[in-house]
Image: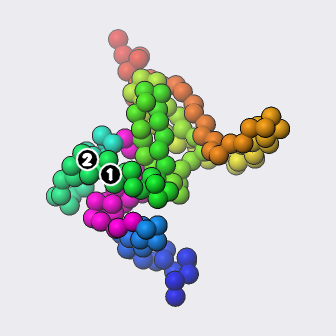
Amino acid sequence: MSSPSATSHLPPATRWAELVRARGLRATRDVLRVLLLLEASSAPGSHESIMQALQTDGSGQPVDRVTLYRVLDRLMQAGLLTRIQDSGRTAHFTLAQSAPSGFFECEQCHSLTALPDDPQLPALLEQLNARLQQKGLHSTDITLSVHGLCHDCEEDSHKP
Ligand SMILES: [Zn+2]
């Protein structure tokens, strides 16, 4: 009755609630709102942007700053969220299950965009890992970081 495939037919909130409880956390309203929000968004969210999005998610329930920090912290410890720090040292959060192998970071506004899926990338990262191991270095996580200007900032830089 509880095979993994069976849970995919449940409503998202119920599915998350089960997953959260399976990791030993309480499935509070705020925990579920954060997970649903990140699931629906295409880019990782900073504390600030998640805060703003939660204020307008239609539930009419504000989340206070401290509660959000605690929720993000708990979800990180439970392994449900991945934290990425940009070069400006701002933390961005994304679902661990959908964390891509890397990000494009805008040098101006520090927005993060997941790198496009490339079928060759996993093999390349494996190779890199093997080379590191030859040097006696054991990686636990590899995240590529590509820097440049995002569309918006690129356009702004062309304005007179
Ligand atoms: Zn930008």
Expressed as whole percent of the image width and height from the top left, the position of residue 117 reads 62, 47
Residue, x 34% and y 63% (percent of image)?
A: 32
Q: Which mark is residue 70?
A: 1
Q: Is residue 55 left or right of residue 20?
A: left
Name the foreground residue: 73 vs 57.
73
Callouts 1 and 2 close, C-beta under 8 Å = yes
- The circle on residue 66 is 2
Query: Mark 1 packing: few (<14 Cα in 10 Å), some, or many (20+)?
Result: few
Q: Is residue 114 left or right of residue 36?
A: right
Quick one: label 2, few (<14), some, or many (20+) residues within 10 Å? few
Residue at image point 52% right, 42% down: 114
Residue 24 on the magenta span:
no
Examine the rendering and report whether any part of residue 107 can be seen. Answer: yes
Q: Residue at x 75, y 46 (%)?
A: 126
| The quarter of the displayed image where residue 90 is located | top left
Under mark 1, the amino acid is Arg
* 30 is within the stretch colored magenta: yes
Ligand 1 contact, mark 2 (Cβ < 8 Å): no
Q: In what element is the residue under mark 1?
A: helix
Rendered location of residue 16, percent (x, y): 41, 68
Mark 1 to mark 2 CA distance (whole Å)? 6 Å
**Residue 11 image position (x, y, % from top left):** 38, 74
